[in-house]
Amino acid sequence: MEGDDITALIGMIILQICYAGINIISKLAMQSGMNPLVLLTYRQIFGTLAIAPFAFFTERKTRPKITFTVLFQIFVCSLSGATGNQIFFFVGLKYTNPTISSAMANVLPAATFILAVLFRQESVRIKTKSGFAKVIGTIVCVSGAMLLSFYHGHIINLGESKIHWSYVERLIKETTPTNGQGKHVLGSILLLLSSFAWALWFVIQARLSVKFKAPYTSTALLCFMAFFQCGLIAVISEHNIAAWSLKSTIRLIAALYAGVVCSALTFSITSWAIQRKGPLYVSIFSPLLLIIVAILSWALLHQQLHVGTVIGSVLIIIGLYAVLWGKSKEMKVEDHQHNMEKATIEKHNGSHIVEEKDDLELQITNIK
């Protein structure tokens, strides 16, 4: 394994650990009584402040002109990729648990495929192996998500964790359980909607990135717009000024972590990895998040694992890899066709130059 491969591997592991942290820390903050909409509002403003310097110093010389059309597209991206996606995610996390939220995140490739077909950015091509794999993978992913939503099953006995974090144990005891079956189903559906909102952002962002090649600037503007959107919704739903206080240590940590780590740091790592290894390389590490979160939830939060959660998660991961395999196969075919067309054009241009050279030599000979 080369040095660049090792660096990319370490980067992907760090990325999944960062995402695992937001699942655990956000859940603790909400168990302490923090409104998820308030947490989300703080995330957007801290994310804006963290990523704005990168945008200014790295893209000030290469940044394209920011037109009204670009601003409108970023506004739509903020509605789907930040506001819609994260509201569904945080409220869904409040009613479920970190393991289910991280499992639902793996539905993203299937959701992206469905929306890309609807927006005619992709074709189904079910008669090909790649197209068939993407369709079957999508069905399996959604089936796993439905199983997670509506079926618990027996508890899997993993034994008792030896880690005793007194603050968390006291917080869990003081918290009144709100996760009945109805809340669990609602939370799972919201998490599923979060994946589709995120997928919609991918579809819109794909068009935006062609016209406006300044990812840090667009992300900073996206977070800034989302701050006002989330803030407006949060103010309407939460009138109590005390709910906005960050005096509680866990609330301050959650707000800073969500904004600085999960908006600025993770974006930087993801952009770096995509540039060197491509988007598929980044996607295949998604199931690692589920494993990390499941272990941390058991060890730190003393959460129980159910049969339905395990089976649903396995189905989602199988579907995820089926979609990714199909997409990888399709990209190889497209690259091969592109190279063949390029070679044909070069060959045609080369033969045309030879013909022109022969004609020129013939003209010179006739003149002589």
Image (cartoon, grey):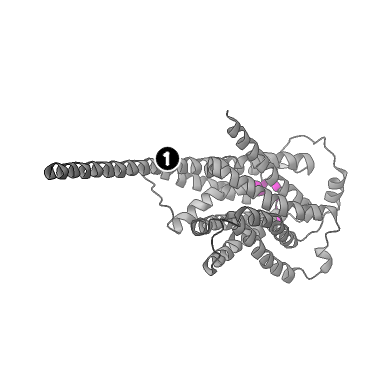
Which residue corresponds to the image point at 50% horizontal and 55% vertical from the top-left?
206
Q: Quadrant of the C terminus?
A: top left
Toward the front, the furthest residue is 368
Q: Which residue is mark 1?
A: 332
Location of residue 201 by image quarter: bottom right
State how many labels appear: 1
Q: Nearer the viewer, residue 352 or 157?
A: 352
- The magenta segment: 95-102
Location of residue 282 by image quarter: top right
Toward the top, the furthest residue is 1
Q: Is residue 99 magenta?
A: yes
Which residue corresponds to the image point at 15% horizontal and 45% vertical from the top-left?
363
In percent of width and height, residue 277 lies at 54, 40
In percent of width and height, residue 223 lies at 65, 60
Position of 330 relative to 244 (above/below): above
Amino acid type shown at disc 1: Lys
Q: Nearer the viewer, residue 119 or 61?
A: 61
Q: Quadrant of the N terminus?
A: top right
In percent of width and height, residue 18 lies at 70, 45
Main structural element of the magenta stretch: helix, strand or loop?
helix
Residue 136 in sight from this viewpoint? yes
Position of 47 relative to 266 (above/below): below
Left or right: residue 123 compared with residue 42 = left
Position of 92 relative to 337 (above/below): below
Q: Residues within 10 Å of mark 1 (few under 14, many from 20)?
A: few
